[in-house]
Image (cartoon, coloured by chain):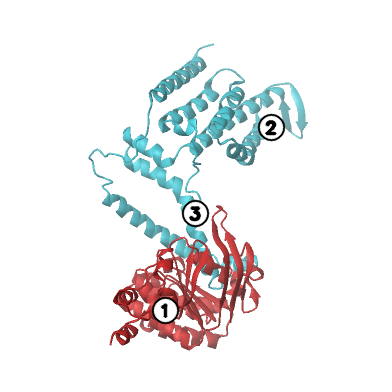
Chain colours: A cyan, B red
Amino acid sequence: MHERLSFHIQRDSFLHRLNPLTKLVLTLALILIAFTFPWYWTPHILVLIAIIPLSIVGKVFREFSLTALRLIIPAAGFLFLMQAFFQPIGEDVIFKFYFLDITSESLMFAFRNAMRVFVMVSAFTLFLVTTHPSELMSDLTRRGLPGQFAYVIISTLQILPQMQAKAQTIISAQRSRGLDTESSFFKRAGSLIPLIGPLVFGSLVEVEERAIAIEARGFTSRHVKTSLHEIPDSAFDQFLRWALLALIIVSIGLNLWPS
Amino acid sequence: MNINIKDLRFTYPTGLEALKGINLTIDSGEQVAIVGQNGAGKTTLVRHFNGLLKPASGSVIIGGWDTAKYSVAKLASRVGYVFQNPDEQLFSRDVLTEVSFGPRNLGYSKEKIDELVKRAMALTELNDKAETNPYDLSPTWRKMVALASIIAMDTSIVIFDEPTTGQDAVNVGRIAHVIAELKKEGKTVITITHDIDFCAENFERVIALSKGQVLLDGHTREVLGQEETLAQTYVDPPQLTRLGKRLGLKETVTRQEEFMQAIT
């Protein structure tokens, strides 16, 4: 009955097996290189040589392309249009729309920015889809991230699906009491109160109970905690992280180089 | 009002096949307990009775109404359903408003609503708590408010989803009393329960589900006597029944009086 509690999709792939921190570094590297490497076609090439191959290696190509089609491409497309119209650069006007000019320069500029955003959102999507949030957080806390911070991130990632499941049960319970949720708009608007009350109250109670539960397990204790799950961090992971870091530095360096 | 279920099958969107061909008839005024291991399909089955779930194939007919063709709000006039967790349905500022929410939705007249609410509150012993906010009550009393809010709808069929979970002996007694009163009024009561003593003492018919199918269905004594078959769905007969078996009593006993009679 339960829906997924995060974006994570469980698969057995090379990408899934990488250490969460490595994947985080990989994500940041893709984004930073796309934004800073001083060559016009960088983001476009990154999509071809990194984003798409990674989604195939991670065995999530189908899910990724669906998300890209439904969400990322429309968002990047919107950005493209806005920038193409409103960027006041260049003289080579190709297209006029009332007072708006589209120049070949603004078109190129918008195309690159849209691709940069595409790389950014795609990289994060791949990261979230192939990394279990609790695995990421236990790895980061092991490396010194404060537990409170990890908790805030984890609970934010999980609260929406959980509230959704809870809301579904409440709706079922009230419909069983004859609440009409299927007819006219006004009837439905009036029927919101019986749904929101239990949802808000229940969520508040849940927050308190969760706080007590995690404190009972020594959440704020300052002792070093061990973890039930050993998260593998191979020599290859470490190598990859350093290599990616080097790439980021080179990319930013080239960007800042006085030309 | 009869319940007729023909070859009912249901699969959740996740691909879990929860019901694999259920055939059942429940007559008007019967007191039925549904038992079985977690995931056997008990809740999935009863959610078909008031249309919260619609059959993937087969049919569920409530007194001539095919649930596939009626909305939940419509079916609510025939089937009342008390959810397991009262916190998922209580929202009003006081108990009285909460209890009258259901009957008001059903569009009864003012006088009838007052009468139904009064009766439901008396039955669940909530009279002195009419003005209280449900959330100021203890969980046991919130459970009674949930019961009252469904009973006040005066439906021919009442479903309880695990009413005795987390309740003390006194409150289990109150719930048993409510069920007995509903029986007197000729209502059909269907209860999902893991409390096998409660089941033995308050129900005439027991349906044991296992993996989406009916494993056993019959008179309480017959069903609870079949220890080996019940074990398939992780249900233990009541201690008295097992004791009677070990003592070599000829008849299956499920209640104290029967046991005492059999050994004297």
**Quarter of the view holding residue B24:** bottom right
**Mark drawn on residue A85:** 2
Q: Is residue A19 left or right of residue B47?
A: left
Foreground residue among B72 and B46 = B46
Mark pair 2, 1: CA separation: 80 Å
Q: Relative to A126, say whether A187 is above or below.
A: below
Labels 1 and 3 within one chain? no
Q: Is residue A201 left or right of residue A50?
A: left
| Disc 2: host chain | A
Please tell me which residue is depicted at 44% across the width and 86% down the height of the picture.
B181
Please tell me which residue is depicted at 40% across the width and 42% down the height of the picture.
A134
Residue identified by numbered label 1:
B221
Foreground residue among B22 and B98 = B22
Foreground residue among B145 and B212 = B212
Q: Please name the amino acid that badge 2 sits on.
A: Phe
How far across and how far down the image is residue B3, in percent? 58, 76
| Nearest to viewer (mark 2 / mark 1) | 1
Q: Please name the amino acid that badge 1 sits on.
A: Arg
Q: Relative to B89, say whether A11 is above or below.
A: above
How far across and how far down the image is residue B41, in percent? 50, 63
**Mark drawn on residue A207:** none
Foreground residue among A194 and A69 = A69
**Quarter of the view holding residue B58:** bottom right
Labels 2 and 1 within one chain? no
Label 1 crowd bin: few (<14), some (14–19), many (20+), radius 10 Å? many
Assess whether mark 1 and mark 2 are in contact (beta carbons under 8 angstroms): no
Residue identified by numbered label 3:
A2
